[in-house]
Image (cartoon, grey):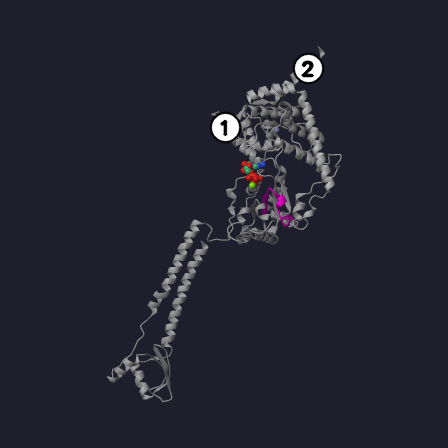
Amino acid sequence: MNIEKRHKVSIWYVLIAIWGVLIFQNYLASTYATQTIPYSQFVQKLKQGKIIEVSITEKIIQGLMKSETGSDQQTSFRTVRVDPDTSELLDKYQVNYAATIESTFFRDLLSWILPVLLFVGIWFFLMKRLSAQQPGFMTLGKNKAKVHKQEDINVSFEDVAGVDEAVAELVEVIDFLKNPDKYLEFGGSLPKGILLVGPPGTGKTLLAKAVAGESHVPFFSISGSEFVELFVGMGAARVRDLFDQASTNAPCIVFIDELDALGKVRGFGGAGGHDEREQTLNQLLVEMDGFDPNVGVILMAATNRPEVLDPALLRPGRFDRQVLVDRPDKQGRIAILQVHLKKVKKLGDIDVEELAGMTPGMAGADLASLVNEATLLAVRNRKKTVEKEQFEEAVERLVAGLEKKNRLINPKERRIVAYHELGHALVALSLPGTDPVKKITIVPRGIAALGYTMQVPIEDRFLMTKTELLGKIATLLGGRAAEEMIFQDVSTGAHNDLAKATNIARSMVTEYGMSDKAGQVYYKNEPQAMFLQQGLNRNAIGEYSDETARIIDQEVRSIIDQQYTIAMKLLNEKRKILEEAAMELLEKEKIEGSYLEELIRQKQTAQESGGES
Ligand code: ADP
Ligand code: MG
Ligand code: ZN
């Protein structure tokens, strides 16, 4: 809007200037101390020898002539030419004559000012059309940061649950924005940039909004990807503009979401499209170095891939404070569920703790959609309130994709799936330190899973022992072992299990030092190191000899083989239980873990009493 106005003003200036030039020209040419005489008089004076000198142009003759009065005095004169033939003729008949110049002012006006005006008009019209079609066309290079004034944001820290450590760190930032003097008095200054790091859906964006909502200052949010589009050089201009805007609005918060889109390591990969991003990133670094955090501009950013960020971004004086926003633990999940359950108007009697126990590994966003899904299910099933049943179904949907009841599998495949899943479950139930089995189903879900065994940990775990890891591997291999035992053949259904089991085994050998032959050595390279060495020293990846590589492979192989044997042995011992449970599972499609436990207990007591008699 501003720009358009400025253009209109300048057009008036141009018009006035043209006008002025024309008038000046006329004035100069005609009236500058010059006497205008008719052409006939000029001819007369010429014949009298009164003309001293002339300069002739196409239409006008100018010059000096002797004055009437004194012979020494000269006057300058000017006359409009008449073509020689006519003037000769006129002289002959002694007619007084003069020529005049027709005024060309209006003709000039029409002949070139009008076209200019027309052009300007068309230009404006086109610009209007363009900017209507493509908002922001007139303001190229202006950032697209959305400015939220304090009234807009009604997110508070109460809406963000289960990430208490992150909240505690951010409270200090808010305190600074509210009482800057308290800190400035002591000569303290806040970190320039705060980077929220964590897996997707853990509430990073939500946290940033809560900071804005609690601190009551303007909040500029922009996504990293918005910097890197449209035209070359735009991104850098946008960064500059964003910081300009921020410093005029201080105190305020600038939030760059998904920083990884713009802050990836420079010079990574080949040519094409990289220069633009690099320029933008460089500009960001320059601006970050340039601004003084004590004016009250706080820069926040979020990413779920901190490992791809350019190390320059993480240096002191840039994003020097990193706040981890991790997946919530069970207590955290309880808190988050409570936040979202509050929004459900017709809620039945729900045990939040149990629900939290069913959702290990889920982040805030998953839990939010879980609650929503359960509510929708209650509506679809015409329930009066949202009940536990709906939540359980919602968990299943989220965990394993949508149920596909109408997908047909042939009976042979169903049998394989049933034995396979029970193989997992029985091994898990027989080994110490494995997670309890909650439920086994052979209802096909999602794209890949034909059935699954749901194991629910009793508590969140941060450490795992070697025994537990081995138990996990055995459980994963239990599916294939059951197939081999029952059908003397194996299927492709185990490929995911094998991948997981191999991963665990490899980690045990290379990361956790849990193999005798490989020893307590860390064989794995950090991904960061790989990025830093990029291009300089590619050979540094894999810092162990080929001999060691062979030992690692052998160790992984032997862990897998041993656990497979253990799983096989366990299943052989429980073959009767396996077969009985399989009948039940094939009929009902779903059985509870408790049913299986009960079955094992029954068989055991039967065996013991049978042995005695
Ligand atoms: P991120 O930016 O980390 O990917 P978001 O902040 O966009 O995740 O979270 C998406 C949604 O998930 C939020 O709007 C909120 O409804 C829910 N959510 C995520 N984390 C939490 C949390 N810790 N507490 C409450 N709700 C959460
Ligand atoms: Mg986000
Ligand atoms: Zn399996």
Q: Image quadrant for the C terminus?
A: top right
Which of 495 and 509 lies nearest the eye of the viewer?
A: 495
Residue 567 x %, y %: 67, 26
Residue 1 located within the stretch drawn in magenta: no
- Closer to the eye: label 2 or 1: 2
Q: Is residue 413 visible?
A: yes
Which structural element holds mark 2? helix
Residue 135 x %, y %: 45, 49
Above or below 369: residue 60: below
Residue 104 x %, y %: 33, 70
Number of disc labels = 2
Cβ(mark 1) to ligand 1 < 8 Å?
no
- At 39% from the left and 72% from the top, the residue drawn is 24
Residue 609 x %, y %: 69, 12
Q: Residues within 10 Å of mark 2 (few under 14, many from 20)?
A: few
Above or below 342: residue 319: below
Assign ligand 2 to one image quadrant: top right
Query: Would residue 344 be found to the left or right of residue 606 on screen?
Result: left
- At 42% from the left and 60% from the top, the residue drawn is 9
Q: Which residues are magenta?
A: 298-314
Residue identified by numbered label 2: 607
Amino acid, disc 1 = Leu
Which of 92 and 159 lies nearest the eye of the viewer?
A: 92
- At 56% from the left and 34% from the top, the residue drawn is 366
Which of 6 and 398 lies nearest the eye of the viewer?
A: 398
Residue identified by numbered label 1: 377
Mark sitting earlier along the chain (2/1): 1
Amino acid, disc 2 = Gln
Would you identify the image quadrant in which residue 485 lies? top right
Which structural element holds mark 1? helix
